[in-house]
């Protein structure tokens, strides 16, 4: 795909995007031109973007750790800062590990981990049917399976006690702050993907209560929170019975908390 445009027509697209508030209007115009099949198709894509739809949902993919991940309308757009969480997981995963990407959205995190470490057995789950449909296409490329349902309730029972790496990029925005998010997130990503309850850590509390029984001895739970939630998130994972530590990213202003199940219970 890609439309051939005169420089005047391209400038008109750039101007339309800029007028709609797109800061990187030239780059976005180039992406939309490459994604469109023909002139009317381009007009449609530019209209959607100018109307506020996230660029990734308009073109149907996002870049994550150097690969394209399909992203449908209504599905959380994987954030580049979550590459930090995946990098921490890559350092901990061992070939042959069972990996679960809980709250998987598009499935970007689990797929990226499976692409970086050979021989993983990937499972993913989400409560949102649109996310599950989208993740099934992405996760298939890593040979994994995707389930629909509420947190661990979606997973097949035989995974209990076998998970080597549990990724859980759960919603962590405090409810009172959802209304302050950029319009792209607030209007075009589902609230269930963003809202983490009163202090943003409600879903994380639920995950950390159940995680120890799903993790294999020596297995790891990895979650992402904002920098200011870091200390409390460590306490949440420790309260669930895991040995917890935080790794901060200056670049993204975020924090990854790793909770590990001891190999031997004392
Ligand atoms: C912040 S998004 C992260 C998506 C994906 N992991 C990523 O990083 O791109 C949170 C995801 O959690 C899902 N979710 C929220 N509550 C859930 C629940 N109770 N059970 C399963 N999934 C849930 C949402 O549908 C959404 O896809």
Image (cartoon, rainbow, N blue to C red):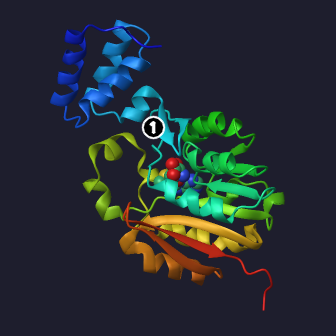
Q: Is residue 220 left or right of residue 88?
A: right
Q: Is mark 1 within 8 Å of ligand 1?
A: no
Residue furthest out toward the bottom: 266
Image position of 261 with respect to 172: above or below: below
Circle 1 sits in a helix, a strand or a loop, which is it? Answer: loop
Q: Residue at x 49, y 64 (%)?
A: 224
x and y percentages locating residue 46 in the rendered image: 30, 21
- For the question of whether residue 120 can be seen, the reply is yes
Image position of 40 with respect to 77: above or below: above
x and y percentages locating residue 134 in the rendered image: 58, 35
x and y percentages locating residue 53 in the rendered image: 34, 33
Q: Is residue 203 left or right of residue 133?
A: left
Q: Where the C terminus falls, by quadrant?
A: bottom right
Q: Is residue 111 left or right of residue 33?
A: right
Image position of 187 with respect to 5: above or below: below
Q: Residue at x 58, y 82 (%)?
A: 238
Per the image, the residue denoted by label 1 is: 74
- For the question of whether residue 148 can be seen, the reply is no
Q: Residue at x 75, y 63 (%)?
A: 163
- The quadrant where residue 209 appears: bottom right
- The quadrant where residue 136 appears: top right
x and y percentages locating residue 20 in the rendered image: 19, 30
Q: Nearer the viewer, residue 164 or 63?
A: 63
Q: Residue at x 74, y 64 (%)?
A: 164
């Amino acid at each position: 795909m890609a439309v051939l445009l005169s420089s005047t027509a391209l400038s008109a697209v750039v101007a339309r995007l800029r007028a709609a508030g797109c800061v990187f209007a030239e780059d976005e115009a180039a992406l939309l031109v490459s994604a469109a099949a023909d002139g009317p198709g381009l007009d449609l894509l530019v209209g959607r973007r100018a109307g506020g739809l996230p660029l990734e949902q308009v073109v149907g993919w996002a870049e994550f750790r150097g690969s394209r991940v399909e992203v449908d309308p209504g599905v959380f757009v994987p954030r580049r800062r979550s590459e930090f969480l995946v990098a921490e997981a890559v350092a901990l995963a061992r070939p042959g590990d069972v990996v679960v990407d809980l709250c998987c959205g598009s499935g970007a995190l689990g797929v990226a981990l499976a692409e970086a470490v050979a021989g993983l057995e990937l499972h993913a789950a989400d409560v949102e049917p649109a996310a599950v449909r989208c993740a099934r296409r992405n996760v298939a490329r890593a040979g994994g399976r995707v389930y629909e349902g509420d947190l661990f309730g979606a997973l097949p029972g035989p995974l209990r006690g076998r998970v080597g790496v549990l990724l859980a990029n759960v919603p962590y925005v405090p409810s009172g702050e959802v209304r302050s998010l950029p319009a792209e997130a607030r209007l075009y990503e589902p609230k269930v993907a963003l809202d983490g309850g009163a202090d943003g850590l409600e879903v994380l509390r639920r995950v950390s209560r159940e995680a120890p029984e799903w993790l294999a001895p020596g297995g790891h739970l990895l979650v992402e929170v904002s920098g200011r939630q870091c200390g409390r998130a460590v306490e949440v994972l420790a309260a669930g019975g895991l040995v917890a530590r935080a790794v901060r990213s200056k670049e993204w202003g975020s924090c990854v908390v790793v909770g590990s199940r001891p190999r031997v219970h004392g």
